[in-house]
Image (spheres, grey):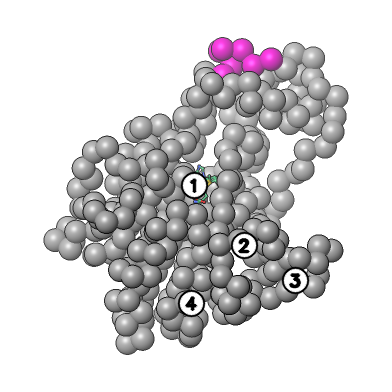
Amino acid sequence: MTNQTTGLGASPERPIAKVAPATLPQNSEISERDFGRMARIVNRAVGIELEQSKRVMIQARLRQRLAQLNIGSFDDYLSFVSGPSGGEELAIMVAALTTGTTRFFREKHHFDHMTLEALPPLVSRARKGGRVRIWSAGCSRGHEAYSVGLTVLSQMSDANEFDVRILATDINVNNLRQAHAGEFRDDEFSPVVAESLENWFERDSAQDVAESWIAGKELRELMTFLPLNLVGEWPMTGKFDIIFCRNVLMYFSVDFQQLTVERLADALAPSGYLYLGHSEHLREQIAGLQTVRNCQSTYRCKDRWR
Ligand SMILES: C[S@@+](CC[C@H](N)C(=O)[O-])C[C@H]1O[C@@H](n2cnc3c(N)ncnc32)[C@H](O)[C@@H]1O
């Protein structure tokens, strides 16, 4: 099944193969030329800029994959990836090149700002029958999206009975599959207050690990998970009241950072908020976005923009 959204040929239903131990290929050094070629393929497909400083790490990660496929050189591997049947392998390669580091309530000031400034008008709108949409773009294994869900439920415990939805997207279908499963270990929850955990998560009895939790019905009903390449087409047509796109753009080339922020600005509803990662503050003014002064890497859609 080709995934229409990512264009990368993988989907949450179709697991990415686990890397099995295998004999390393003979000629598995990545040359300057191959690295340049890989950088161009990856930049075109997903906007990511491969840094020379990561060359050894990338080589180590992909060696295992070459061995598994029984491919003897990076040159042959890149021909396969960019060939007619390479779509799914491109997704696997990108997964090997990106990190999914994340945690609950990361950069907590955004969740505080959301609670105090962004959510109150949205809660009253939802209670009057209005539509509220929040997007976690580059959600990794779901910690960010569930933190958003917990923040919404802390202000509106019956949110799932109204037209309130959280969209969580990522290019990495392995990450997305874990996000969709909504299962987390005890030790992943440290900043989540105990009450919130007890209210919206359940003990996961199906797991061997006793200390694990699974998202409860009210939390799950708020969420939709979708594979999506931020550099590709976005199938969503409606605007978002809040967008989290944090610690994703920092992997992109400057051109794709700029382009993606412009598209995110365009996807915001009037007065909507955009939260970027702490190292992703905008160097240039983006039409339609104004900086929120009291919260780091936070931007608001100008009303007059629409
Ligand atoms: C470091 S994690 C950030 C997770 C979360 N936003 C946070 O701040 O905790 C970066 C995520 O961006 C995703 N990503 C990288 N390039 C992407 C692209 N072109 N489209 C969508 N997601 C992408 C990766 O798969 C990874 O899960």
Q: Is residue 235 above or below residue 152?
A: above
Cβ of mark 1 under 8 Å from ligand 1: the answer is yes
| Residue hosting label 4 | 153
Q: Earlier in the sequence, mark 2 or mark 4?
A: 4
Tell me the CA gap for discs 2 and 1.
Answer: 28 Å
Please indicate whether residue 221 sits to the left or right of residue 242 in the image: right
Residue type indicated by callout 1: Asn
Residue type indicated by callout 4: Leu
- Where residue 198 sits in the image (x, y, percent)? 63, 77
> Which of 267 and 275 lies nearest the eye of the viewer?
275
| Residue hosting label 2 | 189
Q: Residue at x 64, y 58 (%)?
A: 188
**Numbered tag placed on residue 204 in the rendering:** 3
Tell me the CA gap for discs 1 and 4.
Answer: 28 Å
- Which structural element holds mark 2? loop
Q: Earlier in the sequence, mark 1 or mark 3?
A: 3
- Which structural element holds mark 1? loop
Which of discs 2 and 3 lies nearer the camera? The answer is 2
Query: Crowdedness of circle 1 by 10 Å Cα count: few (<14), some, many (20+)?
Result: many
Q: Residue at x 39, y 40 (%)?
A: 279
* Residue 246 inside the magenta-drawn segment: no
| Residue hosting label 1 | 229
Residue type indicated by callout 2: Phe
Query: Crowdedness of circle 3 by 10 Å Cα count: few (<14), some, many (20+)?
Result: some
Q: Is residue 5 visible?
A: no
